[in-house]
Amino acid sequence: MSGVDLPDSSVTRVLFVCTGNTCRSPMAEMLFRKLAAQRLACRDWELRERGIDVFSAGVAAGENSPASAEAVQVMREHGLDLSQHLSQRVTREMIRKSTLVLALTERHRRALVDFCPEQSSSIMLLGRDGFDIQDPIGGSLDEYRECALQIGHNLRLWVEELLKKDV
């Protein structure tokens, strides 16, 4: 995949988008925060001061649904607290304000491009290999763990690319 040309801005806003915003995209948000904080040698709550804003939403999300119990458990295993997460539906405003929108599947990416075509250059697939991150909803805890591993693997590449100029 080709490199990302980010606009020169004081804040890098990264938006993760899946279907319901109750497992994949919130896990991606939390894991990105952890990796970015490690890369910048700061606490995750200091990312905003460092010019990094990270959030998540869903293309078909109900408002204010909690993260799935399995997603909360898997993030706890990574030392992260997803228990306070509440889902939200993606809006054009969210997309327009984002430096980079990372969709969890190609179907999500296409839906976002159709929804907000003027931002198509900033909407990309999270999977750097071109593959979708499969939805673990309704699956076993091990399926959630595998999903988190896939997300984390791909996020390492994004974090390195997005933050290379800051290190």
Image (cartoon, helix red, strand yellow):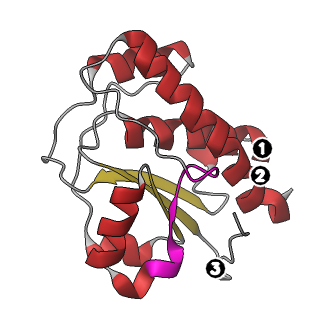
- Per the image, label 1 sits on a secondary structure element best described as helix
In the visual, does 106 lie left or right of 9?
left
Q: Which of pointers 3 and 2 lies earlier in the amino acid sequence?
A: 3
Which residue is labeled 1 in the image?
39
Seen in the picture, residue 64 relative to 126 is either above or below; the reply is above
Residue 6 in percent (x, y) is at: 66, 76
Name the disc covering residue 9, or none.
3
Report the disc number at residue 160. Answer: 2
Q: Which quarter of the figure has residue 33?
A: top right
Q: What whole-number distance in Å separates the C-alpha atoms at marks 1 and 3? A: 19 Å
Secondary structure of the residue carrying tag 2 is helix
Instruction: Inspect the image, locate mark 2, and give the three-letter code of the amino acid beneath it.
Output: Glu
Type of amino acid under label 1: Arg
**Does the residue at mark 3 contact the one at mark 2 (Cβ under 8 Å)?**
no
Task: Calculate the distance from the C-alpha at mark 2 to the C-alpha at mark 1.
Answer: 8 Å
**What residue sits 34% from the left and 58% below the top?**
108
For residue 122: magenta?
A: yes
Front-most of residues 157 and 93: 157
Magenta residue span: 120-130
Within 10 Å of the Cα at label 3, are there few (<14), some (14-19), or many (20+) other Cα atoms?
few
**Total number of numbered labels?**
3
Q: Quadrant of the N terminus?
A: bottom right
At 28% across and 17% down in the image, what residue appears? 69
Q: Do tag 2 and tag 1 residues touch (Cβ < 8 Å)? A: yes
Vertical arrangement, residue 107 with respect to residue 2, above or below: above
The structure residue drawn at horizontal position 63% and vertical position 63%, both measured from the top left corner, is 51
